[in-house]
Each structure stands twice: as C-alpha cells, then as structure tokens.
C-alpha cells in the first residue's frame, strides 16, 4: 500500500500540465480519467490515507514480531533456568548419596521372588509335566486324493 501511494504521488508530480490546468486527465491501465481540482485534492487525500494505512499495518507487524521474539526468548530463559535448577538438585542428591553409607540389602524371601504364580512353591522347584499333544488323524495310503489349494486332486493325473 505504501508503494502504491508513492507511485501515485510520483505519477502526479511528473505530469506538470495536469496540475496547472482546471481539469487534469490521467491514464491508468489504459483508462483515462478527467479530474477537476477538487477531485484531484480528494484523490490526494485518499492516496495519503492508503499510505497511512499501509504504514500502520507495517508497524503492527513489527510489534507482533517483536512480541513473539520476546516470548520465545523468555521461554528459552525459563527452560534454561529450569534445567540449571534440575542439574543443581541432581548434584545435591549425588552428594547426599556419596555421604550416606550403603545400606545392607534387605532380606528377601528368595522363593517369593521366584514364585510368580504365588502358589507357595518356587517356580524352579515345581514339577513340570509334558504338554499333551493333540491327536492328528493320519492319512491312509489307500486314499489317493489330497487336498490341494481348496479342492481335491488325484495324485496320478489322468487326461
């Protein structure tokens, strides 16, 4: 919008004959406009308003970008502070761990850790039985038919 307003001002300032007479004619995109001095004045006011609107939009964009950068910088600083705080807590816990003597391991029931089914007998000591095998019917040699891809075929192919 700023460039458009600037181009309009330059176009008018180059045409001295248009500003000196009572009516001015301008050609824009192959269209000719006849403007009186009053219409010419209002065209200048509109051009100035377009310029100011473009300037306001440009400055608003700059403010938004600056606010976004400020929020990003603040969040990065907060994250950096949080990491530093966590690292300090970690160092403090490591120092406490170094000063604290190692406690003897608690007596645990060895069988309870190995008794996953909780039946009172350690899993290693439980007797295991062989798993029952399902009975699969055997194919008799008398039958020459075999199931192949969903249908029966004879093993000896006859034509």
Image: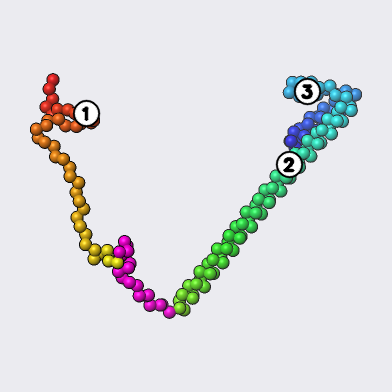
Residue in the picture at 56% in, 67% down: 85
| Residue under pointer 2 | 57
- Nearest to the eye among marks 2 and 3: give it: 2
Count neighbours of disc 3 (C-alpha within 10 A) and say few if under 14, some if 14 to 19, many if 20 or more: few
Q: Secondary structure at mark 2?
A: helix
The coloring applied to the image is: rainbow
| Residue furthest to the front | 119
Q: Report whether 57 appears left or right of 118.
A: right
Rendered image: mark on residue 131: none
- Earlier sequence position, callout 2 versus callout 3: 3
> Gap between marks 1 and 3, in whole Å?
88 Å
Q: Which residues are magenta?
A: 101-119
- Earlier sequence position, callout 2 versus callout 1: 2
Residue 42 position in % (x across, y down): 86, 30
Q: Is residue 131 above or below residue 89?
A: above
Q: Is residue 104 above or below residue 48?
A: below
Residue 107 position in % (x across, y down): 35, 75
| Nearest the eye: 92 or 137 | 137
Q: Secondary structure at mark 3?
A: strand
Residue in the picture at 79% in, 39% down: 52
> Gap between marks 2 and 1, in whole Å?
78 Å
Q: Is residue 90 above or below residue 50?
A: below
Q: Report whether 71 appears left or right of 118.
A: right
| Residue under pointer 3 | 27
Picture quadrant of residue 135: top left
């Amino acid at each position: 919008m700023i460039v458009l307003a600037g181009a309009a001002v330059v176009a008018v300032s180059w045409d001295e004959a248009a500003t000196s007479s009572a009516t001015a004619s301008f050609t824009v995109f192959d269209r000719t406009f006849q403007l009186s001095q009053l219409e010419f004045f209002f065209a200048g006011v509109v051009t100035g308003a377009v310029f100011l609107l473009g300037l306001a939009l440009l400055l608003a964009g700059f403010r938004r970008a600056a606010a976004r950068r400020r929020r990003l910088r603040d969040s990065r600083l907060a994250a950096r502070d949080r990491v530093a705080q966590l690292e300090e807590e970690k160092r403090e816990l490591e120092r406490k761990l170094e000063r604290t003597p190692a406690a003897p391991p608690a007596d645990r029931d060895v069988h309870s850790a190995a008794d996953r089914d909780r039946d009172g007998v350690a899993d290693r000591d439980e007797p295991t039985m062989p798993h029952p095998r399902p009975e699969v019917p055997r194919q008799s040699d008398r039958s020459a038919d075999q199931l192949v891809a969903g249908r029966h075929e004879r093993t000896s192919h006859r034509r």
